[in-house]
Image (tube, grey):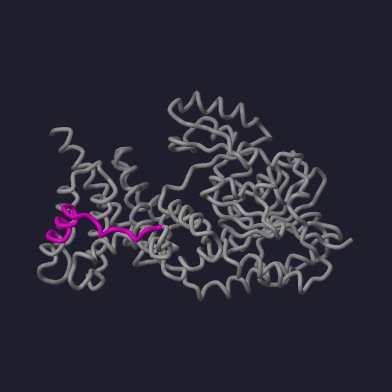
Amino acid sequence: MTDGGRQVAQALSARGLARAVLERVERDGAYAGRALAAALDRAQALSPEDRALATELVYGVLRRRGRLDRALDALAREGTGHLDLGVQIAMRVAAYQILFLDRVPAYAAVNDAVEACKTARGRGVPGFANALLRRLSRVGEPPLPDAAGDPTGYLEAAAGLPPWLARLLLAELPAEQAIAFADNLVAPAPVTLRTNTLRITREALAEKLAVERPGAELPPSAIAPDAILARHFEGPAKTAAWRAGLFAVQDAGAQIVAELCGAAAGERILDACAGNGGKTAHLLALAGDRAQVDAMDLSTAKLDEGTRTLRRLGAISARAITADLTQPLADPTPRYHRILLDAPCSGLGVLRRHPEALLRRSPDDLAPLAAQQLRMLDTVAPALLPGGLLTYAVCTFERQECEEVVAAFLGGHPGFSLEPATTAASGGRVPWATLVDASGAVRTWPQRDDADAFFAVRLRAGS
């Protein structure tokens, strides 16, 4: 078999896996990352190149879904929305390769999609797909709206944002920044490492990783003092440095949230909504593993995963507590010097990592999420010692879950005040002035900070 033929054959198997994962995401509501990981685990025979292509296709199609449908619908008299889901997915996978990839010839992408469509209901579907995709390969997609003259149209067409989200983003950011944010949404999410300072410095870790992965680029983050922006760095969990517990994978924005909360030796700290333990481990590292951190979450599976993470990193001063923070705590007696609440939210700041959320979120979600976040703040506040610090964070940018939740909490708890982040005791490690808005809240942005979009504030209890 020629090199070109071998490349095409490999691509076919990768495309089939990608289609199956995408169908699970759309038909069953599966999370893309989990569905892809499970499919790749079952497909052990796939080469590294196949696995990379399948991953590219899954995330690329999800990120560009709106743009792909726009291109296909422009060439179809009745559009493509009436077709079976499997046919739509096959055509999107082919269209993504035609428009955005040059690794596989267009004819191979078309032929593969046509073969996949042969099992679909309805006469003439394979012929329709063949004609439409071949035409797309000849004429390309329709011109995009001008970003400067029609930013809303550009956000909807180029980034595939639903109209409500395009309007919301433009309400939060100047047009050029909104467009830069959206351009980041359709790019692969960066791999960011957090140095485990209980065992190594950032500089020493970068040197070790450079030896293990000589082709990687490992610049330090400009905002998070323990973060390394790992480029061309595949399979971090397969490195000796990972096995030795020298680092964790954690976005720089998430690291800034833990830095904002802070931690000191001898303190008692609650990591509410602890999830898989990333921020728990970071807080312990900030305190030299000499603080007592309670990792609280509703999911025992996440807490178990967090326990394994802490064990690998050598952070031992934590305990796991299962609790529903929408309900009053069993024992709200004030006992914590600091509480970190990284609350469940719309996730609009992490869409590049979870692009399937674009299919599922609606503006009707925002008010119920804000109400839940406020309930959680009300739940944890009584557990804070007088003069203690409550840090509230969400990985989104819209006002209902950010400023309005904070304002509602402060209105109901006059003993608390917003403490500007510039007073955060980080020993000069974090450039807070570049991250703080006029209200004193911290915001991180992908287009500015190489970080997910987080909103976070420090709320100080009265003495």
Horizontally, is 343 left or right of 72 in the view? right
Q: Is residue 358 above or below residue 248?
A: below
Q: Nearer the viewer, residue 294 or 381?
A: 381
- Which contiguous range is marked in magenta? 130-147
| Residue 53 on the magenta segment | no
Give the image location of residue 442, x and y in percent. 66, 54
User: Relative to residue 329, is residue 155 drawn left or right?
Assistant: left
Counting labels gives 0
Residue 316, image x, y percentages: 70, 43
Q: Which of the two residues, 381 or 292, is positioned nearer the viewer here?
A: 381
The N terminus - image quarter: top left
Q: Position of residue 279 (x, y in %)?
A: 64, 49
Image coords of residue 48 (percent x, y): 33, 38
Residue 141 located within the stretch drawn in magenta = yes
Identify the image quadrant of the C terminus: bottom right
Give the residue furthest to the top. Answer: 211
Quick one: 221 or 344, which is closer to the camera? Answer: 221
Compared across the picture, whether 319 is left or right of 119 comes to right
